[in-house]
Amino acid sequence: MPLHPAMVPPSPSTTTGNEKEVVRAYFNGTGFERWRRIYSNTQDVNRVQEHIRRGHNKTVAAVLHWLQEDGDVKIRSFCDAGCGVGSLTLPLAAMGARRIAASDLSEAMLSEARQRAVAAGVSAEQVRFHVADLEALGGEFHTVVCLDVFIHYPQQAAEAMVRHLASLSQNRLIVSFAPYSLSLSLLKAVGSMFPGASKATRAYTLKESGIVAAAAAAGFRPTGRHLFCNAPFYFSRLLEFQRC
């Protein structure tokens, strides 16, 4: 459930101590309908939302391709951390994956994911949905995926989360984030001049070197890398790591 920097600049009303609750409230409230539309096939989206939809879909497609290349998904276990409405979980289940743990901070987003799973004929045995933030996740999985969630984490917290997610993975870790760059920082600054109700949470860009170093500290090496730039409203660095 990403909030992209060009669309959602930092809000001075949020602080480190309550940011998680701000994000939870946003995606359970005013943000839910907005992002539910983005992650659907409806034509009821504006230009910004359409850009984000296309960019996110490309990110998901790249991840599904990697997972297919890795072998038979039927014998793998997966954790979709920050699953939103199931943009990755549902096509992964359609590919035949039988063991998926899908979690999200937002009860509203997860409820939507469950409804979409039922409509798609995905069984409860295939996917276990549960409400949880990233810090609360536990278990052991062949592959852990976290897409477009680190937008809510500053650099040090994101690096700590990479190490945590890596501790849940037996083999593979896949993450995406908004990469830091001067041009993106300028775009974000311009966006901050236009406050509005949709800009309710902080949006962080991250330095790739720190993410890679955090994964290395957890025993993972980078094996795949893409940049998805559906300018001017979607920028996502996708990284794949495998255990050394």
Image (cartoon, rainbow, N blue to C red):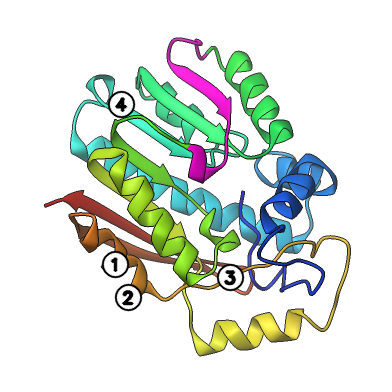
Residue shown at 72%/73% (left/top)?
Answer: 9
At which x and y percent is residue 182? 52, 89
Residue shown at 54%/69% (left/top)?
Answer: 154
Mark earlier in primary sequence (2, 3)? 3
Q: Residue furthest left?
A: 244
The image quadrant that residue 43 belongs to is top right
Mark 1–mark 4 Cα distance, whole angstroms, equals 23 Å
At which x and y percent is residue 103? 53, 33
The foreground one among 114 and 128 is 128
Element type where label 3 sits in the image: loop
**Residue matched to label 1:** 212
> Residue 128 magenta-drawn?
yes
At which x and y percent is residue 11? 77, 71
Mark carried by residue 77: 4
Residue shown at 29%/44% (left/top)?
Answer: 167
**Residue matched to label 2:** 209
> Residue 130 magenta-drawn?
yes
Mark 2–mark 1 Cα distance, whole angstroms, equals 5 Å
Q: Is residue 238 left or right of residue 71?
A: right
